[in-house]
Image: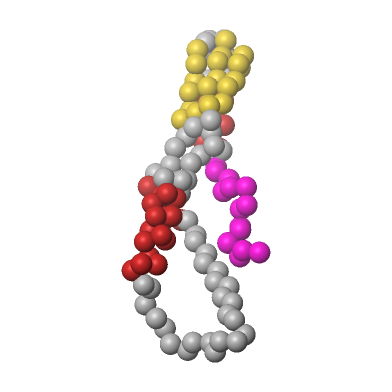
């Protein structure tokens, strides 16, 4: 089991600001739409933890090598191909991107979440 799995379902965000925005229009006389947008800054990538686990096996009929070899350029190419494929998938996103709330005279009538 990884020691990095601190929040397996995601990192919870502070919802107080969203609650405050929703409550701010729950007043008599407010009729309309309130939209809250949720996004991430590039700084979020600095908080990502990447753990690397190596499990090496060797054949019993061959002695284990004790020297450190540099990666072979021929072996690096398939690894780079995999990384090129993964790069577009290695993104941090909020599942919820926006919240829309419709009010009539300060009373919440309809609520929708954009994902």
Residue at 58% from the left image edge and 22% from the top image edge: 112
Q: How many marks?
A: 0
Which residue is farthest left?
Answer: 73
Q: In the visual, does 94 lie left or right of 111?
A: left
Q: Residue 69: x, y in percent?
A: 39, 81
Q: In which quarter of the view is residue 13 placed? A: top right
Identify the residue at horizontal 43%, vertical 55% (top origin).
82
Residue 54 within the segment the image draws in magenta: no
Q: Is residue 71 above or below residue 112?
A: below
Q: Residue furthest right?
A: 1
Report if residue 30 is visible in the image.
yes
Q: Measured from the top left, where is residue 18 in percent x and y? A: 53, 32
Q: Residue at x 50, y 12 (%)?
A: 32
Magenta segment main secondary structure:
loop
Nearer to me, 55 or 18: 55
Q: Position of residue 55 (x, y in %)?
A: 58, 73
In which quadrant will I find the N terminus? bottom right
| Residue drawn where x is 54% and y is 89% of the image | 63
Task: Give the image's coloring scheme.
Answer: secondary structure
User: Does residue 85 sit above or below 77 in this rendering?
Assistant: above
Examine the rendering and report whether any part of residue 44 can be seen.
Answer: no
* Magenta-tinted stretch: 1-14
Query: Which residue is nearer to you in this view: 29 or 75?
Result: 75
Q: Residue furthest front?
A: 61
Identify which residue, 62 or 18, lies in the foreground. 62
Residue 12 at x, y percent in the picture: 58, 45
62 vs 79, nearest the viewer = 62
Query: Compared to 9, does 101 lie above or below?
Result: above
Q: Is residue 72 left or right of residue 31?
A: left
């Amino acid at each position: 089991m990884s020691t990095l799995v601190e929040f397996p379902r995601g990192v919870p965000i502070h919802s107080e600001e969203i609650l405050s925005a929703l409550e701010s229009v729950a007043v008599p006389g407010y009729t309309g739409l309130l939209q809250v947008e949720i996004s991430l800054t590039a700084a979020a990538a600095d908080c990502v933890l990447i753990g690397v686990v190596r499990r090496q096996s060797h054949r019993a009929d061959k002695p284990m090598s004790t020297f450190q070899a540099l990666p072979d350029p021929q072996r690096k190419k398939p690894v780079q191909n995999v990384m090129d494929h993964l790069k577009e998938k290695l993104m941090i996103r909020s599942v919820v991107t926006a919240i829309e709330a419709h009010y009539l005279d300060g009373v919440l009538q309809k609520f929708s979440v954009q994902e």
